[in-house]
Image (spheres, grey):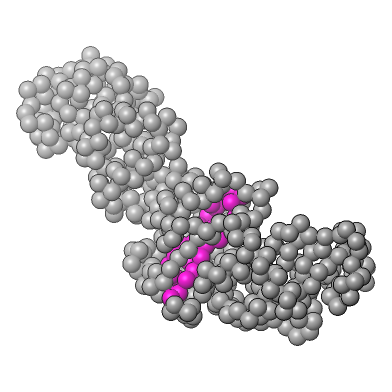
Amino acid sequence: MSTQNKQGNVVTRFAPSPTGFLHIGGARTALFNWLYARRHGGKYLVRIEDTDRERSTDAATQAIVDGLNWIGLSPDEEPIFQFSRVDRHREVVEELLKRGQAYKCYCTPDELDQMRKQAEAEGRPPVYDGRWRDRDPSDAPAGVAPAIRLKSPLDGETLVDDQVQGATRFPNSSLDDLIILRSDGTPTYNLAVVVDDHDMDITHVIRGVDHLTNAARQICIYNALDWQIPVFAHVPLIHGADGAKLSKRHGALGVEAYQEMGYLPAALRNYLVRLGWSHGDDEIFTQEQMIAWFDFDGLGKSPARFDFDKLGDVNSQYIRNAAPKDLLSDFQALLPHLENGEALADQYADVGWEAFEALVPSLQERAKTLNDLVDGSAFLIAQRPLELDDKAVKILNDQARSNLSKLCDALADLDPWTTESTESAIREFLEREGLKLGKIGPPIRAALTGKSVSPPIFDVMAVLGRQESLDRLKDQSA
């Protein structure tokens, strides 16, 4: 379904509260909004809902903006800050008062508490009883600042014709007269959202299903103002792989944590789009396919399950299929987020980034994350003499060191020094000495990398170059 505003464009929005990081559920909501806008040639906006001044922080706002930029979901215009629009929200409240669609409520906190207790004792929903709804303003107590409440419908029901959840009906008796302006003059969430969405020409509100009841309340405000109601699409929440509510142990982390763990932005987008949405049995999508195929009919109602193993599989496919130059860029972007990342970047630069790029094809087949590339290429920047792991120490016995000494002599004048030439020279050496590659390969690997596992030894020798390779081999020779 596609509804357009007066300009004829689809406009979506992602509206996070800057009280913490951009969590994975928020990133998926942003992605769905971005995809729908792109699918329909529309506009995707971001609104920072910072009206909770006690909990909103500049650091959280920056984390959200940085997270959206990293994952590739920057808005089409500069973000809008909700708090800056407080005067506009109050203006709309005044309009509702003039229309007779809102009223001043002078109930004290004690009265409201007593009202709730009485309703619960009588088995009724603990909703406001409307005692100031039609009361004469002259009854207002002196010196008491009122809250402003919406005159919600007293009977019937409010229909949320949702594109994911279907037609959902709410008895108006359960919605009560919600506060739209607090007694201190600050607007409430539901009022601010409606005003902002209207003024931003939002045509489609795509958000979590936990906002479904808010949609009913917001529709009441839209109707009171005679404003066009946007299309609602409330997507299922994300649970852990065990079906429990998503927590940090499941993956409810900030997007920046996924960057630090070495996931690629495109892979994370691909994984997130499959949490609650599907296109047949397809698992891996290009960005163009996601945009072309994304629509509400592919969204399910059941909670999606976050699975780190599945994310790892998707990420590994993206790494395997990436061009070495692109992985180099992603790798360089990762380093500042790692411990000692600045020092690591300097060390790779000293060796030469071209050496790392040349090594990428040997690393990417086995890598699940960019951090695996860090581990796999660590030998490039290791300082001599190399620190050997336990398995490398066992491999480099007296016989192995003696063989390495002979090999150094055989390779001393090799020119050119390439993957092909070193392999050819070593195989000639093995034939002369009557050895198998399995006898000399592990000691070469241990001497060159300090480990028992590495990329192919001839690739390692090529990227290290003649002098560094011979020096490392001599370090471990008899």
Give coordinates of residue 253: x percent, y percent. 55, 48
Give coordinates of residue 310: x percent, y percent. 45, 56
Which corner quadrant of the image does residue 47 belong to?
bottom right
User: In the figure, 366 relative to 475: above or below?
Assistant: below
Of 250 and 1, nearer the camera is 1
Q: Is residue 229 left or right of residue 420?
A: right
Give coordinates of residue 326: x percent, y percent. 28, 48
Which corner quadrant of the image does residue 222 belong to?
bottom right
User: In the figure, 1 relative to 47: above or below?
Assistant: below
Of 86 and 326, nearer the camera is 86
Of 207 and 178, nearer the camera is 178
**Which residue is at the far top?**
478
Q: Is residue 302 left or right of residue 326?
A: right
Q: Is residue 116 left or right of residue 193?
A: right
> Is residue 28 in the magenta section?
yes
Of 18 and 143, nearer the camera is 143
* Residue for point 39% across, 41% down: 334
* Residue for point 52% across, 62% down: 14
**Which residue is at the far bottom?**
156
* Residue for point 33% across, 36% down: 376
Give coordinates of residue 192: x percent, y percent. 64, 65
User: In the figure, 451 relative to 123: above or below?
Assistant: above
The answer to whether residue 456 shows anywhere in this view is no
Magenta stretch in the rendered image: 9-37
The answer to whether residue 352 shows anywhere in this view is yes
